[in-house]
Image (spheres, grey):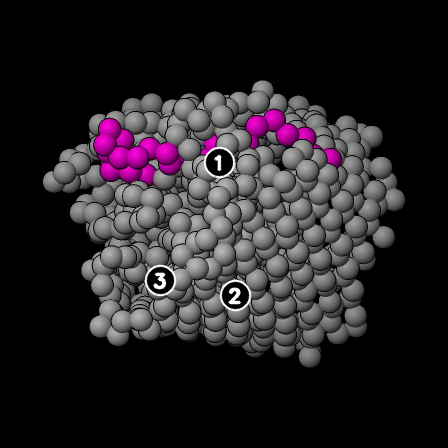
Amino acid sequence: MCTTTLTAKAALTFILTAGILLLNNGNARADHETPYITVYPGGYISDSPTAPGYAEAVSVVRLSPGNNSVIPAKKFETLHAVSFKDMLASAPGVEAQPRFGEEVRLSIRGSGLSRSFHLRGINILQDGIPLNLADGSGDFQEIDPLLAQYIEVYRGSNALRFGAANLGGAINVVTPTGATSTGTTLRAEAGSNGTFRFNVTNGQKFDNGDSFVSVTRSVTQGYRDQSDENKLRFSGNTGYKFNDKVETRFYLTFNDLDQEVPSTLSLYNATHNPRAAAPINLTNDYQRNIRSLRFSNKTAFSLDGGGTLTTGFYFNKKTLYHPIFQVIDQHSTDLGTFARLQDRDTTIGINLNHGLVIAKQFVNTGGIRGALTADNNQIASNIELYGEQRWHLTEPLSLITGAQTFLSRRSLDNNANANASADKTYYGINPKLGLLYEPRRDLQIFGNVSHSAEPPTFGELVQAPVVGFVPLDPQKAWTAELGTRLQRGGLHVDATLYRSWLKGELLNFTTTPSVPAATFNAGNTIHQGIELGVGAHLAPRIQGNLTYTYNDFFFDGDAQYRDNDLAGAPPHTIHASIRYDHPDGWFIEPSLEWVPIGGYVDYANTLRSSNFAVVNANAGIDLGHGVKLFLDARNLMNEKYAATYSTVTNARTANTDVFYPGEGRAFFTGLSVKF
């Protein structure tokens, strides 16, 4: 049973960290004209208004009164990175644990905490353009880790710069351009479980523009039974600068992704027989296959007197063929447009989108469509208006005000039974108020209070055997956070304490095999925690990094579960690494992922998942002339553990075959050659 306050040890950790930073406060004045670059050193400044550089992204982070991260691709470019699990390991407050293949359970500050499939509560963007479906649900497979230049993580209301006002915030994957990645690069990887991946990129810069293309082909037999993958990805963009004031950029992405689906297991099998899959997954050939085409545009207008107006549109076409307990066969089309006016102190924007999903289900007969069991048209449309304004109260102190308002409609046309059709409209206003204190260029102290509201997605609204929509309200929350950012010499620290008061949290729990999830609005719940990231030069050519996340999520006086912990996340997650760079161009970086206490699996708090400690090692060498080699060694101690799980109501009475095992020992090597 949890308490309603942070544990004494966790609170003490945060207080000591904040105290050390305050003692180093000093009396130096802040330079508001030239933001100090922090988080990670290095990067570049782009001269393209449609494709800002890493250093510019970090500068934007420093203007926010909240905890955000900018993760350069160099953090994972020498890994066999396949998912957000690999890409976001250095981001505190982000839980990204693999279910299978590239499918991860992604949560920020407990967003979509109990969601046992896909994604809810986080806006996924690529180059600032939405990837989520119009109803707010999302996938991960369409993002190629080899295509990331850097990743922005905006937690909670800090994502207001994109118009997002949800509990989790937004993740924006920024891709290379011909100006930032000139020339041709070939990359080949091979490793355990029959894994091969090949990538070729080419970037060209012209007098008035640039172009970039990338093609990735990957195959693997997978660590588990029923986990083969066969994937082809293409991505390209081209930019053209009409003059010093106007630049446009077009993007085209295509994905052809086939992925088998292994089953969840009991905790015993996940930790003793992790390669196994349930017989039904083999017999009915469970899969998750995606074909997608995405075309989008951004056009930036540099305004007289400073500021940029960015407009754009996007078109996403996707098919999902997903044989599981039934064959889920969906064809989706999403259209959207957006406009953002931004300068250093002001953001004003609008997002409009509309989506149609032709959703059919069939009896699964060995992975092939059988008799039709469901035939729905799911239609979602959204209007979002948002703005944010910075007020300089004094030279070191700024007040940030903002708000977002939304109008969302969800319609269901049941083609098999017109009486089961449904229509509902949701709306809300989400204000934000923050303070940013910068007494010196290497230290910031910030705090904010914000409101969020999230309408349910179709995955929650449409659940057999309920006729029409499940009667669900939007999930709402008030969130307060307090934190600090410090970079001094070879030390950088990001520390944040937050607390969210939720009403109507959308919680999922496993019921029976034929109904994979049921959703309800909880009463009052609390999400609170600590996000800590520390990097330090420990010695010449030795860099240490530590990421710590503390999660304390619980019911607040619930009629059934009282003050029990919410199921779905471990209380503590630690990532640590030490990297040595030799003058001759080689490096070695051992790392540790440690979950000392498993999270609760059920709301009755009768069963915890396994604790685990996974040791990895990464090494590489730059041979010169554009040739690089790397080795990625995973789970060196061959730890058997449950990486994540679905949630249940009471483990003493429910089926607890809900665990996804972590992958065992594996080795991958890679070679890249740049011409």
Going by the image, does 64 lie left or right of 112?
Answer: right
Question: Residue, x 49% and y 63% (percent of image)?
Answer: 130
Q: Which residue is mark 1?
A: 277
- For the N terminus, the image quarter is top left
Image position, residue 290 (x, y; %): 54, 58
Q: Nearer the viewer, mark 3 or mark 2?
A: 3
Going by the image, does 184 lie left or right of 598?
Answer: right
- Residue furthest left in the image: 559
Question: Residue, x 48% and y 36% (percent of image)?
Answer: 277
The earlier-in-sequence mark between 1 and 2 is 1
Tell whether label 1 touches label 3 (CB within 8 Å): no
Residue 531 picture quarter: top left
- Callout 1 crowding tier (Cα within 10 Å): few <14, some 14–19, many ≥20: some
Q: Which residue is mark 2?
A: 318
Residues at marks 3 and 2, CA–CA distance in whole angstroms? 21 Å
Q: Amino acid at mark 2?
A: Lys
- Callout 3 crowding tier (Cα within 10 Å): few <14, some 14–19, many ≥20: few
Magenta residues span 647-669
* Mark 3 secondary-structure assignment: strand
Q: Nearer the viewer, residue 627 or 206?
A: 627
Q: Main secondary structure of the magenta part?
A: loop
Image position, residue 326 (x, y; %): 40, 54
Image position, residue 93 (x, y; %): 42, 40
Q: Which residue is mark 3?
A: 373
